[in-house]
C-alpha cells in the first residue's frame, strides 16, 4: 500500500565536514561523494523512513519503488548493486539491509497451504503470532482464489527453491514502523522471459494502528499487493500509473465492502480532472484513478480489465502494448473508440450517482467555469488549453431575462494535428430529471457546431465537456513517469469556444 517519499537519504558514504579555515594550504579539499542512483536513494528513503504515527493510507507504495530499483540494477555500479540487492532481498537473507530484515539467528516459523507460505518470527520487533500468520495465509488464499481462479489472471511466477520451495512466499515484519502496510518485490526474471519476474511479499506483522483496523487493512493490502505480484508475471516494466490504478481497483473486487480506496478519489480525475490520467507522482493520483478502471469494468464487464492486461503481456512473442494502447486495442475489439470513451469517463465523473454502482458516495467533479447567459450578455467565449488526458467542463445556465424557447449554439474550434484527439460534448440536464448527451462533431480542421435547448422551463443547465484524449508520445522508454515512459506530444490542446443564446 502507499507510502510517500520524503527527502532522499544519504548514499551511505560519509562526507567530511570541515569548518571554514581548517584546511591547510597544501591539502586538497575532500571531493564530495558521487550521488547514488536515484532509484537506490528513493528505495533507501521509503524503506528506511521511520514514523511514530499511525498512517492512514496516504503515503507512497514501496512496491513500485522496489520495482524501479530492480529494473535499474543492471545500470548501477558494483557498490550500488550490492546496496540494491540488500534492499531487494527477503527478510531472511543474511546481509540484507537493516530496514526490513529479521535479526540474525532469529528462529522463523511458517504457515503454509498448497500455494502459499507465510514466514514469521515470534520474537524481536518483527514478532507475530501463529494465529495472525494463519489469518494472513487465509486472506492471501482468498486473494489468490478471487484474482486467479475466478477472475482468470496468470498466477505469480513460481520462485524455484527461494524460500524453501516454489510456493509463493509472504513474510511478516514490522513495516508499519516505516509507514507501510506491506509491499511486493520482484526478485529475478522468469527463465526465458526477461520482462517477467517472480516476486515475494512482505506484510505488516499485526496491521495495528491503521484507521480501518487490522483485519480490514490486511484484506485490502493482500488484494492490492498480490495483484502486483500477478502484474510482475505479466509485464514487470508496465506503466506505473496503470499498475497502481488497477491494483487499487482490485481491492474493490476482493474486499469491496471495505471501501478503503475511496479516500484516493479526490486525487484522481474524479477530483482533479486537470491532472493527466497517466500521472505517477506523490500526489497519489494513480491510486485515485482506479475509478478509470472501474469505468472500463462497468462499461464492458469485469473481464475487460483482464483482456487489457492480456494485451500488455510482455512474454516473448506477445504484443506487449503499453497501458492505454492496450485499453484502446480492447475498445476497438468491442467496436468502441478511445476518444469517445475517455470523454464519457470525464462525463461520468460529473454525474457519479448516475454513472457508478457506488456513485452516490462519490463527490462529483467540479466544473472549471460557469457561464450565465442573459438578454444583455447572450454571448461568451473562452480559450482553455488542456494537457494530455485531461478534461475541462463549462457549465452554462440561462438567466431569467432570456425569453422562452431560447436555444444554445456552441461553436468549437480545436487545434488538431496528426493523431491528436480533441473531443467536445454537451450534457443537457432537463428539469424532468433526464440527461441528454450530445456530441459536437469536429471536422478535419477541428471545427464543429451544435444547438441544444436552453429553455429555462425545460432545461436546468447545460455542461460543455472538452477533452484531450491524445495518446501520442515521443521517446517512449526514455525513462519518464508518463505512459510508455515517454513524453506527451499534445500537452497544449487549445480550444476556442463561442456560446450564444438565440431564439
Image (spheres, rainbow, N blue to C red):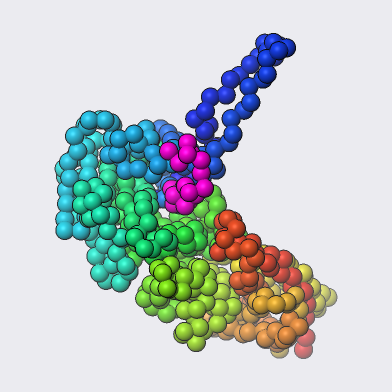
Question: Depth check: 470 or 219 in front?
Answer: 470
Left or right relative to 352: residue 499: right
Residue 73 is covered by the magenta coloring: yes
Quarter assignment of residue 414: bottom right
Q: In this view, does 430 lie above or below 97?
A: below
Left or right relative to 460: residue 60: left
At 58% from the left and 30% from the top, the residue drawn is 33
Range of the magenta residues? 65-82
Residue 236 lies, in percent from the top left, at 43, 59
- Residue 464 visible here: no
Question: Depth check: 250 or 454 in front?
Answer: 250
Residue that extends furthest to the right in the rendered view of this protein: 376
Q: In this view, does 473 lie above or below 423?
A: above
Residue 81 is covered by the magenta coloring: yes
At 33% from the left and 66% from the top, the residue drawn is 253
At 31% from the left and 54% from the top, the residue drawn is 222
Residue 335 lies, in percent from the top left, at 50, 87
Q: Is residue 18 above or below residue 175?
A: above
Residue 450 lies, in percent from the top left, at 70, 86
> Magenta stretch: dominant SS?
helix
Quarter assignment of residue 404: bottom right
Quarter assignment of residue 301: bottom left
Please count the marks in the image: 0
Q: In this view, does 372 lie above or below 167?
A: below
At 63% from the left and 16% from the top, the residue drawn is 18
Location of the C terminus by quadrant is: bottom right
- Residue 120 visible here: yes
Question: Depth check: 281 or 320 in front?
Answer: 320
Question: Depth check: 279 or 488 in front?
Answer: 488
Amino acid at each position: 500500500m502507499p507510502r510517500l517519499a520524503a527527502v532522499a537519504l544519504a548514499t551511505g558514504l560519509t562526507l567530511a565536514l570541515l569548518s571554514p579555515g581548517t584546511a591547510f594550504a597544501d591539502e586538497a579539499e575532500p571531493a564530495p561523494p558521487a550521488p547514488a542512483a536515484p532509484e537506490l536513494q528513493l528505495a533507501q528513503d521509503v524503506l528506511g523512513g521511520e514514523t511514530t504515527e499511525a498512517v492512514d493510507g496516504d503515503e507512497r507504495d514501496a512496491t513500485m519503488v522496489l520495482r524501479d530499483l530492480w529494473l535499474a540494477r543492471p545500470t548501477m555500479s558494483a557498490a550500488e548493486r550490492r546496496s540494491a540487492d540488500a534492499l531487494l532481498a527477503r527478510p531472511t537473507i543474511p546481509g540484507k539491509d537493516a530496514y526490513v530484515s529479521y535479526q540474525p539467528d532469529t528462529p522463523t516459523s511458517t504457515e503454509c497451504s498448497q500455494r502459499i507460505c507465510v514466514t514469521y518470527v515470534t520474537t524481536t520487533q518483527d514478532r507475530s503470532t501463529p494465529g495472525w500468520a494463519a489469518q494472513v495465509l487465509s486472506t492471501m488464499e482468498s486473494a489468490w482464489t478471487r484474482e486467479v481462479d475466478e477472475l482468470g489472471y496468470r498466477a505469480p511466477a513460481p520462485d524455484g527453491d527461494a524460500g524453501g520451495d516454489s510456493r509463493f512466499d509472504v513474510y511478516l515484519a514490522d513495516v508499519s514502523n516505516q509507514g507501510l502496510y506491506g509491499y511486493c518485490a520482484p526478485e529475478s526474471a522468469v527463465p526465458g522471459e526477461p520482462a517477467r519476474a517472480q516476486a515475494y511479499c512482505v506484510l505488516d506483522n499485526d496491521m495495528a494502528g491503521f484507521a480501518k483496523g487490522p483485519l480490514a487493512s490486511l484484506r485490502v493490502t493482500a488484494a492490492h499487493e498480490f495483484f502486483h505480484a500477478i502484474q510482475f508475471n505479466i509485464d514487470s516494466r508496465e506503466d506505473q500509473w496503470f499498475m497502481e490504478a488497477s491494483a487499487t481497483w482490485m481491492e474493490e473486487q476482493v474486499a469491496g465492502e471495505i471501501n478503503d480506496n475511496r479516500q484516493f478519489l479526490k486525487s484522481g480525475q474524479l477530483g482533479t480532472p486537470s491532472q493527466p490520467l497517466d500521472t505517477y507522482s506523490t500526489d497519489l493520483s494513480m491510486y485515485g484513478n482506479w475509478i478509470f478502471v472501474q469505468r472500463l469494468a462497468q462499461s464492458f464487464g469485469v473481464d475487460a480489465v483482464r483482456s487489457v492486461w492480456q494485451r500488455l503481456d510482455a512474454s516473448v512473442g506477445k504484443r506487449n502494448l503499453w497501458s492505454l494502447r492496450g485499453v484502446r486495442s480492447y475498445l476497438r475489439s468491442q467496436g468502441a473508440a478511445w476518444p469517445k470513451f475517455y470523454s464519457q469517463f470525464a462525463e461520468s465523473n460529473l454525474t457519479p450517482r448516475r454513472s457508478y454502482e457506488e456513485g452516490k458516495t462519490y463527490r462529483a467533479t467540479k466544473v472549471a467555469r460557469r457561464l450565465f447567459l442573459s438578454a444583455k450578455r447572450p454571448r461568451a467565449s473562452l480559450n482553455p488549453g488542456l494537457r494530455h488526458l485531461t478534461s475541462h467542463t463549462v457549465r452554462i445556465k440561462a438567466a431569467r431575462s432570456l425569453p422562452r424557447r431560447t436555444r444554445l449554439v456552441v461553436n468549437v474550434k480545436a487545434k488538431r494535428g496528426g493523431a491528436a484527439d480533441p473531443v467536445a460534448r454537451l450534457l443537457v440536464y432537463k428539469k424532468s430529471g433526464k440527461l441528454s448527451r450530445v456530441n459536437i462533431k469536429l471536422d478535419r480542421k477541428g471545427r464543429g457546431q451544435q444547438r441544444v435547448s436552453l429553455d429555462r422551463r425545460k432545461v436546468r443547465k447545460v455542461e460543455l465537456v472538452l477533452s484531450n484524449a491524445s495518446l501520442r508520445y515521443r521517446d517512449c522508454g526514455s525513462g519518464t513517469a508518463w505512459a510508455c515512459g515517454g513524453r506527451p506530444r499534445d500537452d497544449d490542446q487549445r480550444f476556442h469556444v463561442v456560446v450564444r443564446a438565440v431564439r
